[in-house]
Image: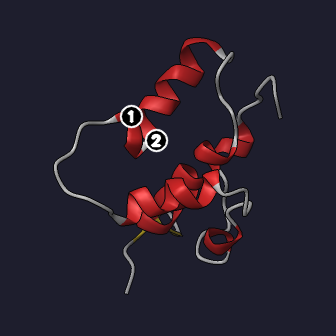
């Protein structure tokens, strides 16, 4: 069972954002791109444990699978609301 906020499943939407962030190259998008990379890329943070669902979401995005697995779980893409220079 998932927790919902504002009508959307929070954890699933976070996983979708992580996946989509890894899928797109946000380099060259200034400080906003850097901040989003830091916040939504688990590989940018120091951690002690191994794989997590967040790492899996990032790796799935890097594999060019277009994050389709998360679209069924979360129909809303926050990153698509932001205009990026390479999209």
Picture coordinates of residue 41, whole percent (x, y): 45, 41
Q: Quadrant of residue 43?
A: top left
| Vertical side of 31 occupied by 77: above or below | below
Position of residue 50 measured from the top left corner of the image (x, y, whole percent): 26, 59
Question: Splitting the image into 4 quarters, where does residue 70 fall?
Answer: bottom right
Residue 14 at x, y percent in the picture: 47, 56
- In the displayed image of the protein, which residue is found farthest to the left? 48
Q: How is the image coloured?
A: secondary structure
Q: Which residue is mark 1?
A: 44
Which residue is most to the bottom?
A: 1
Please give the label number shown on residue 40.
Answer: 2
Element type at mark 2: helix
Q: Residues within 10 Å of mark 1 (few under 14, many from 20)?
A: few
Judging depth in this view, the residue of 78 and 63 nearest the camera is 63
Residue located 73% across and 56% down the image: 64
Residue in the image at 41% along x and 65% along y: 11
**Neighbour tally class for label 2: few under 14, some 14-19, many 20 plus, Cα within 10 Å:** many
Q: Is residue 42 left or right of residue 23?
A: left
**Secondary structure of the residue carrying numbered label 1:** helix
Which quadrant: the C terminus? Answer: top right
Q: Is residue 43 left or right of residue 48?
A: right
Q: Quadrant of the N terminus?
A: bottom left
Q: To which quarter of the image does residue 21 belong?
A: top right
């Amino acid at each position: 069972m998932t927790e919902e906020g504002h009508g959307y499943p929070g954890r699933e939407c976070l996983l979708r954002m992580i996946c989509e962030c890894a899928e797109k190259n946000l380099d060259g998008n200034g400080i906003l791109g850097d901040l989003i990379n830091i916040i939504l890329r688990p590989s940018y943070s120091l951690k002690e444990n191994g794989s997590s669902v967040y790492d899996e979401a990032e790796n799935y995005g890097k594999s060019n699978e277009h994050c389709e697995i998360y679209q069924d779980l979360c129909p809303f893409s926050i990153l698509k609301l932001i205009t990026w220079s390479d999209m």
